[in-house]
Image (cartoon, rainbow, N blue to C red):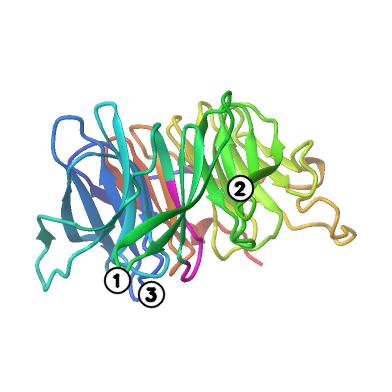
């Protein structure tokens, strides 16, 4: 199926790659996004869906000194977020606080909460604990995994532990398991590594080439979804990692990111350089499945999992974010700086 120009749009001034749902804002459907301009001063935009759901409104516009490669909102404080940024060949990561606006649209300075300055190689991303208050942060660079203890009130971040992924491994990203705060998945050039944060050791791996993104299913324990470079998305049962339990091809070029819905079982978004955003529905387990069996029906036992393909984009789509407050809404961000908010309600199968 093809998706038309049904979404609500918002344009950034410069190119961009990352967008995040503001989970801690329980009163509005809000997103944070940051730009990626080499020559101009970059910006962080706080945008909200209007109460009538008809337009995206800029609630705050803040200057950011460097190109923003990763941005993530704090799950327990709507004013706090993290960025990974670069200036030339220098990379950094920091935690920021949005200043009190007192009715003004913009403020020239974000307030620094903490600098994650222990990295010596290229930083890839910062991971917050998926839901609720938690004083730990994870940051990932090309070689290392860092576990931080963050105190937002004292504005400090201290390294609690650090471990190298190995000389021949180049980390590219990761995700934190919402069902087990001791577990994270890290993407490498040629595999996905599962790590235990208590021991800072790798516990298992998926030897699968060219994985660009991973996400955990919020509703199904042991379910991990990966964005494969050239083959759409794979769904894995973490208890048996030799082969995926489902394979959803559907992108004609690289699949760049994948996001599992925070509320609806089996609802998944993927996006890439097609450019397109695909909406998937992974069927529930069959009735005779036991706890140790596959969490998703084999492809031969299901209908087409592709619910819709949103194709109204002129550039690659690198950013996706579900709304935690209204889980039938998602925001996408294309490289040309265009944010589009869509509702999946028209595409969900009726019960």
Q: Position of residue 277 (x, y in %)?
A: 47, 42
Q: Is residue 82 magenta?
A: no
Instruction: Specify start and end residues of the magenta stretch as a single range.
Output: 126-134
Measured Cα–Cα span from mark 1 to mark 2: 47 Å
Q: Position of residue 350 (x, y in %)?
A: 62, 64
Residue located beneath label 1 in the image? 52
Tell whether 204 sits left or right of 86. right
Q: Main secondary structure of the magenta part?
A: loop
Q: Nearer the viewer, mark 1 or mark 2?
A: 2
Measured Cα–Cα span from mark 3 to mark 2: 34 Å
Residue located beneath label 2 in the image? 200
Position of the N terminus by quadrant: top right
Q: Quadrant of residue 111?
A: bottom left
Front residue of 117 and 278: 117
Q: Nearer the viewer, mark 1 or mark 3?
A: 3
Q: Quadrant of residue 62?
A: bottom left
Up the image or down, 158 lies above or below 318; here it is below
Say what secondary structure mark 3 lies in.
Answer: loop
Front residue of 135 and 110: 135
Q: Earlier in the sequence, mark 1 or mark 2?
A: 1
Identity of the residue drawn at 56% across and 25% down: 167
Tell whether 295 sits left or right of 101. right
Label 3 CA crowd tier, 10 Å (few <14, some 14–19, many 20+): few
User: Does the rendering let one see residue 257?
Assistant: no
Residue located beneath label 3 in the image? 26
Identity of the residue drawn at 57% across and 59% down: 348
Say what secondary structure mark 1 lies in.
Answer: loop
Outermost residue toward the top in this view = 168
């Amino acid at each position: 199926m093809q998706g038309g120009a049904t979404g609500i749009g918002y344009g950034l001034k410069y190119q961009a790659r990352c967008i995040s749902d503001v989970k801690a804002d329980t009163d509005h459907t809000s997103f944070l996004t940051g730009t990626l301009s080499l020559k101009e001063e970059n910006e962080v935009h706080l945008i909200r869906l209007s109460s009538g759901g008809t337009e995206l409104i800029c609630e705050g516009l803040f200057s950011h000194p460097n190109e923003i490669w990763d941005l993530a909102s704090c799950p327990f404080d709507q004013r706090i977020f993290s960025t990974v940024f670069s200036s030339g060949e220098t990379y950094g990561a920091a935690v920021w606080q949005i200043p009190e606006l007192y009715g003004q649209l913009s403020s020239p300075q974000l307030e620094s909460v903490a600098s994650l300055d222990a990295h010596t190689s290229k930083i890839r991303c910062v991971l917050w604990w998926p839901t609720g208050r938690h004083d730990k942060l994870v940051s990932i660079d090309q070689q290392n995994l860092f576990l931080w203890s963050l105190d937002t009130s004292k504005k400090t971040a201290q390294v609690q532990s650090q471990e190298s992924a190995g000389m021949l491994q180049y980390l590219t990203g990761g995700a934190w398991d919402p069902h087990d705060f001791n577990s994270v998945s890290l993407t490498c050039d040629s595999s996905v590594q599962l790590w235990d944060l208590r021991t800072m050791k790798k516990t298992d791996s998926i030897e699968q080439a060219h994985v660009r993104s991973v996400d955990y299913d919020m509703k199904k324990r042991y379910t991990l979804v990966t964005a494969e470079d050239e083959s759409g998305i794979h769904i894995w049962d973490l208890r048996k990692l030799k082969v995926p339990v489902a394979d959803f091809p559907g992108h004609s070029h690289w699949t760049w990111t994948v996001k599992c819905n925070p509320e609806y079982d089996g609802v998944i978004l993927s996006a890439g350089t097609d450019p397109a955003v695909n909406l998937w529905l992974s069927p529930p387990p069959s009735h005779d499945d036991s706890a140790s069996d596959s969490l998703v029906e084999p492809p031969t036992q299901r209908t087409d999992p592709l619910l819709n393909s949103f194709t109204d984009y002129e550039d690659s789509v690198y950013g996706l974010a579900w709304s935690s407050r209204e889980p039938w809404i998602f925001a996408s961000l294309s490289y040309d700086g265009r944010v589009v908010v869509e509702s999946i309600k028209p595409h969900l199968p009726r019960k």
